[in-house]
Structure formats: structure tokens, C-alpha cells
Image (spheres, rainbow, N blue to C red):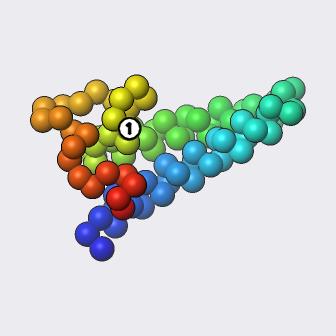
Amino acid sequence: MKYEKQLAMLRKVQEMEFVAIELNLYLDTHPCDRDAINDFNCAVEVLKKYKERYEAEFGPLLNFGFGGLSEDPWQWVQGPWPWEL
């Protein structure tokens, strides 16, 4: 597959997003669980690094708001988009 490396990096982002969301949901009902808070903070840091690495190599994951700045030319229209992999 032409985009194997990109797909593998996107998968890491998706997996870490899942971990962060699950920990977030757990913390909604267990707000004083210090271990879970530490795990959540760690997951968010790893997720941030994965997203930065992905965007540096393949372009933005989102078109506005949470995505990084665009270079010239406008990167959002460069394919494939994350959901096209």
C-alpha cells in the first residue's frame, strides 16, 4: 500500500485518542483517582506528540481550530485526508 507509513501513524493517533477518551470517561465518575489522572495526563502528552509528528510529516489532521498552522500552499487540500486512508 502506498500510504502504509501514514496509515500506521494515523492508527497510533487513533489508539491514543481512544485511551484518552476512555480515561476521561472513567474520571467523570472517579474524579479523585490519582493514578487515573496521571494515566490521563500521560496519554494526552503522548497523543499530542503523535499528532505533532503526524502533522509534521503528512499535513493537518483537522482543517481548523485544533489543527496546526498551514504552510504554503494550503495543506488541507493535499490528499489523502485522514479518513481516506
Residue found at x 24% / y 30%: 70
> For the view shown, which residue lies furthest in the left direction?
73
Q: x and y percent of residue 42 in the render?
A: 63, 36
Q: Is residue 5 visible?
A: yes
Quadrant (top left, top right, bottom left, bottom right) of the N terminus: bottom left
Vertical relation: 5 (above or below) 70: below
Residue 35 in percent (x, y) is at 80, 36
* Camera-nearest residue between 35 and 74: 74
Query: Residue 33: x percent and y percent?
Result: 85, 32
At 79% from the left and 33% from the top, the residue drawn is 27
For badge 1, the amino acid type reads: Leu
Q: Is residue 39 visible?
A: no
> Is residue 19 left or right of 56 when viewed as pictured?
right
Q: Quadrant of the C terminus?
A: bottom left
Q: How many marks?
A: 1
- Picture quarter containing residue 71? top left
Judged left or right of residue 11, residue 42 is right
Q: Which residue is mark 1?
A: 62
Which residue is at a point 84% across and 27% down the rendered structure image? 31
Q: Is residue 31 left or right of residue 1?
A: right
